[in-house]
């Protein structure tokens, strides 16, 4: 859409999506417009994912302060080292047998964690190893922050940055499944907004694009020139339904000076931008209108409507794990004349010699 704001794109998409899922959803409940808008930073904090399933009512709470300087040494050390402790409520789980908690501990270890700490609550307060080593006032502050009552429990994820966010999101999903809390027969939509324009590359320690380099930064050229790159947000957004990303979209950059500066921050000199994207830059210089959009994947929409857990079940020509289309017999050998026609040379690996032993 030309000359469209982010809000105008949202309004069009919401009308299409709500109408489509209402018509073909076989009576299932569908979110009505306007869909909930969740900034990326909040999504990672509260849901542990930038593709949150809003049918799941559980919300993650940062309880780092409750463990900072506390008697529970492991979490106190993580808090002192700049990490986070996140709490995931488990309503009604406090009355579950010990095997319930042992099974979740085993699951956590299978997913790369050391275990899954928890506190259960009864009329006498918090119970379990963590509660035993944590001051009573701190246990109570956690209970109050999460609104827990006797018969409930709370689980903890601890660590730094993306790792603790991702794991707490996995715990949130697993608990909702185990406790049968996920809303049934519903399509719950949301927008994830305000993605960061840049991120720090963990390997090179250099600033790099985090999502889409051709999106318009919020604040335009002024933001690029005056703000810390890691604080700059972009007009980028995802539309998510039941934890499935249907589409990424953006208000695109249409100004050559903004594009050059955006790439310069990520380590690309103007000469390289000209060499790689000269056609686009020239189009911008001639005058491109502000524009943006979103293009949800039909396959993903059909997967949700058909209630299929795997997108391969609805793709017309699915590929196997080796990237082969068995129905079409692809990929197929390329005739030598086609290779010559395209001035290509093949550099195939030499077959390994076969050694025959007596």
Image (cartoon, rainbow, N blue to C red):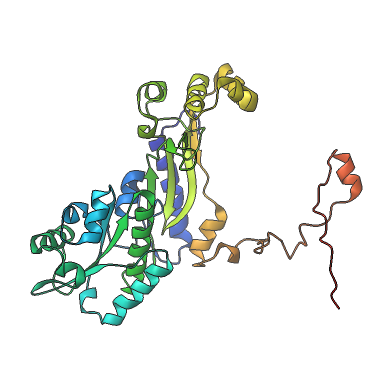
Q: For this rendering, which residue is in front, 145 or 248?
A: 145
Outermost residue on the right side: it is 337
| Residue 352 in which image quadrant | bottom right
Q: Position of residue 335 (x, y in %)?
A: 89, 51
Q: Residue furthest front?
A: 358
Query: In the current view of this chain or complex, which residue is farthest to the top?
Result: 286
Quadrant of the rendering where the C terminus is positioned: bottom right
Residue occupying the point 55% across, 19% down: 287
Instruction: Residue 131: give x, y in percent of width and height.
Output: 16, 68
| Residue 273 figure quarter | top right
Task: Give the quarter of the image for residue 118.
Answer: bottom left
Residue closest to the eye, 353 or 143: 353
Q: Is residue 30 left or right of residue 301?
A: left
Q: Is residue 129 above or below residue 330?
A: below
- The answer to whether residue 39 shows anywhere in this view is no
Relative to 273, is 113 above or below? Answer: below
- Residue 142 in view, yes or no: yes
Left or right: where 340 falls relative to 331? right
As drawn, 257 above or below 144: above
Residue 170 % position (x, y): 38, 62
Residue 102 is situated, as x and y percent measured from the top left of the image, at 32, 77
Q: How many marks?
A: 0
Q: Is residue 76 above or below residue 185?
A: above
At horizontal 41% and vertical 36% (from top left) the residue drawn is: 6
**Horizontally, is 53 left or right of 333 in the view?**
left
């Amino acid at each position: 859409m030309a000359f469209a704001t982010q809000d105008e794109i949202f309004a069009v998409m919401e009308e299409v999506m709500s109408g489509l899922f209402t018509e073909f959803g076989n009576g299932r409940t569908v979110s009505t417009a306007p869909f909930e808008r969740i900034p990326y930073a909040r999504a990672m904090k509260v849901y542990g994912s930038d593709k949150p399933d809003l049918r799941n009512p559980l919300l993650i709470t940062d309880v780092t302060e409750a463990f900072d300087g506390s008697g529970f040494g492991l979490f106190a050390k993580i808090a002192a080292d700049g990490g986070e402790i996140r709490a995931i409520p488990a309503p009604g789980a406090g009355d579950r047998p010990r095997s319930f908690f042992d099974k979740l501990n085993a699951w956590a270890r299978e997913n790369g964690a050391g275990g899954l700490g928890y506190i259960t609550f009864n009329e006498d307060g918090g119970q379990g190893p963590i509660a035993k080593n944590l001051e009573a006032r701190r246990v109570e502050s956690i209970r109050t922050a999460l609104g827990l009552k006797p018969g409930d429990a709370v689980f903890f994820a601890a660590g730094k940055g993306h790792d603790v966010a991702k794991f707490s999101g996995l715990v949130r999903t697993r608990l909702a499944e185990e406790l049968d809390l996920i809303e049934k027969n519903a399509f719950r939509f949301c927008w994830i907004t305000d993605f960061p324009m840049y991120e720090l590359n963990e390997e090179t320690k250099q600033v790099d694009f985090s999502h889409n380099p051709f999106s318009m930064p919020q604040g335009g050229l002024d933001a690029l020139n005056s703000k810390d790159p890691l604080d700059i947000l972009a007009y980028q957004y995802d539309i998510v339904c039941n934890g499935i990303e249907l589409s990424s979209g953006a208000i695109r950059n249409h100004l050559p000076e903004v594009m050059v500066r955006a790439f310069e921050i990520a380590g690309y000199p103007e000469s390289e931008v000209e060499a790689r994207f000269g056609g686009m830059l020239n189009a911008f210089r001639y005058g491109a209108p502000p524009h943006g959009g979103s293009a949800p994947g039909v396959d993903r929409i059909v997967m949700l409507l058909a209630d299929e857990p795997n997108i391969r079940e609805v793709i017309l020509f699915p590929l196997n794990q080796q990237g082969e289309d068995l129905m079409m017999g692809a990929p197929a050998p390329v005739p030598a004349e086609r290779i010559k026609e395209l001035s290509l040379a093949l550099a195939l690996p030499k077959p390994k010699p076969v050694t025959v032993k007596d």
